[in-house]
Amino acid sequence: MSGLIGRKIGMTSIFDENGKNIPCTVIECGPCVVTQVRTNEIDGYSAIQLGFDDKSEKRAIKAELGHFKKAGTAAKKKVFEFKGFDQEYKLGDVIAVDLFTEGEFVDVVGVSKGKGFQGVVKRHGFGGVGQATHGQHNRLRAPGSVGASSYPSRVFKGMRMAGRMGGENVTVQNLRVLKVVSEKNLLVVKGAIPGHKTSYVIIHK
């Protein structure tokens, strides 16, 4: 799937032609530089690698500097490979937010916000032990029993328990593109996308 790399700016809302208030997310989308071209003859598959967001030379290792020098561009903070572009690109080409058009649907991939170590009520939506009756005292948010009897004498794999929550790759599909602001490299999509503000996201067509 073709697409671009972007950065989440934040959420806002706009009004449509019928006066309905639509929640939306603003993404700084590109411009992205083609930093590598994969071919079937050399790599066994066809794709292009895009780089986004410059970083200073002192924060890049020599291997990175040599890699990006071939494309004639500065070192990038984020790179990602895409397949399925309609036209052919060569090293150093720049792909802007004009790749997307208003009204089409895109998929957005990002890393969800980290919540830290959470209990079963927040992490899995448990209701607690016995709700708030029958003298439960301080057991309202407890997970309850997790094991079986003497057989099989163990806790089954996949049992929902407390643990780290968030910080996972999440894909939100079929978000409608509401606006494309070419002069500012902004993409406005309907609804919410994963990640905190300023986090990197991948936008697939």
Image (tube, rainbow, N blue to C red):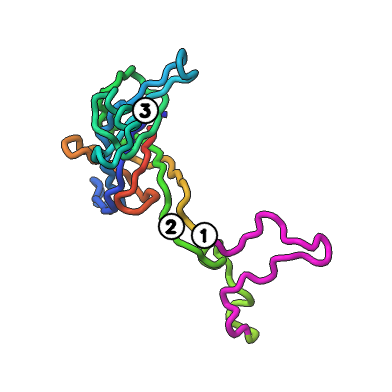
Q: Nearer the viewer, residue 114 or 175?
A: 114
| Residue at 30% over, 38% down | 60
Q: For residue 114, which numbered disc appears in the image?
A: 2
Dot 2, crowdedness within 10 Å: few (<14), some or many (≥20)? few
| Mark positioned earlier in the residue sequence (2 or 1) | 2
Residue 97 in view (yes/no)? no
| Residue at 42% over, 29% down | 1
| Residue at 34% over, 38% down | 78
Q: Main secondary structure of the magenta part?
A: loop
Q: Which residue is mark 1?
A: 164
Helix, strand or loop at label 3? It is: strand
The kind of residue on which mark 1 rests is: Arg
State how far apart marks 2 and 1 are (Cα).
8 Å
Is residue 193 positioned above or below 136 on the image? above
Q: For residue 49, which numbered disc appears in the image?
A: 3
State how far apart marks 1 and 3 are (Cα).
32 Å
> Is 96 a magenta residue?
no
Tell me if 28 is positioned left or right of 195 in this view: left
Read off the magenta span: 136-163
| Residue at 46% over, 15% down | 40
